Amino acid sequence: MMNLLGQALVGIGILVFVIGGLVLLAIMVGLYVMGVYNSLQRLRVATEAAFSGIDVQLKRRHDLIPNLVNTVQGYVAHERGTLEAVIQARAAAMKGGTIAERGEAEGQLTSALGRLMAVAEAYPDLKANQNFLQLQGELSGLESGIAQSRGGFNGSAQGFNATLAQFPANIVGRLFGFTPFDFFKAGESDRAVPVVKF
């Protein structure tokens, strides 16, 4: 009888040990998943913050364009097609959409602005206009700021995407619905148009 009781106690001890081990393993896995999730969240928030830096620069450029078009319009009335192209590209860029769509729309706007600046080169009175020179300088500064912000965003997106692609973060990411970020690229038209120097 004592031997049977001893065997029962050993069996219960093994069962408690196995259950305790499984509970400990479940806790460790849960903590690991929580750590990966928090890491992905931190990277996602940093990437979204980097995109807001681009957004601020783009809004400032969108706000500057009507003043630039109005200034140029007084000097180059017969270049209506160029002015309308800038206005239409600005409207398309302000619509929003995915990061890839916005990148393409902003590339179209940059291309249209480049053509506008090329037209302005043919008008000496316009090039001497103080308001135009000020707006041209602001636009140049904004283009530099956009390029820097785009580089910062793309770096953050690359870090997030690389982490999300690694095992086992890819499993945790899929489980919680994380998706990779698109890069904010210059549009095809942006690459094809030569840079106009101010």
Image (cartoon, rainbow, N blue to C red):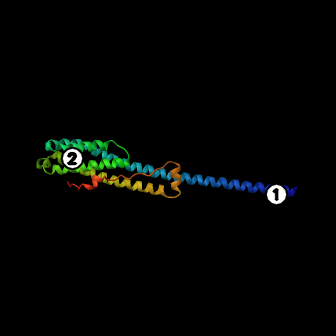
Q: Which mark is residue 135?
A: 2
- At label 1, the amino acid type is Gln
Taking depth in this image into account, of 82 and 142 the one nearest to the observer is 82
Measuring 78% from the left and 56% from the top, which residue is drawn there? Answer: 11
How packed mark 1 is, by other alpha carbons closer than 10 Å (few <14, some 14-19, many 20 or more), is few
Position of residue 172 measured from the top left corner of the image (x, y, whole percent): 53, 52
Does 62 sit above or below residue 195?
Answer: above
Q: Name the mark nearer the viewer: 1 or 2.
A: 1
Check disc 1 and report its element: helix, strand or loop.
Answer: helix
Going by the image, does 113 lie left or right of 183? Answer: left
Q: Of all residues shown, which one is farthest toward the left?
A: 125
Q: Earlier in the sequence, mark 1 or mark 2?
A: 1
Q: Amino acid at mark 2?
A: Leu
In the rendered structure, find residue 7 and report the number of the disc placed on it. 1
Please give the name of the residue rendered at 26% of the width and 42% of the height, measured from the top-left corner. 88
Frontmost residue, 167 versus 15? 167
Pinpoint residue 76: horizontal percent, then vertical percent: 14, 44
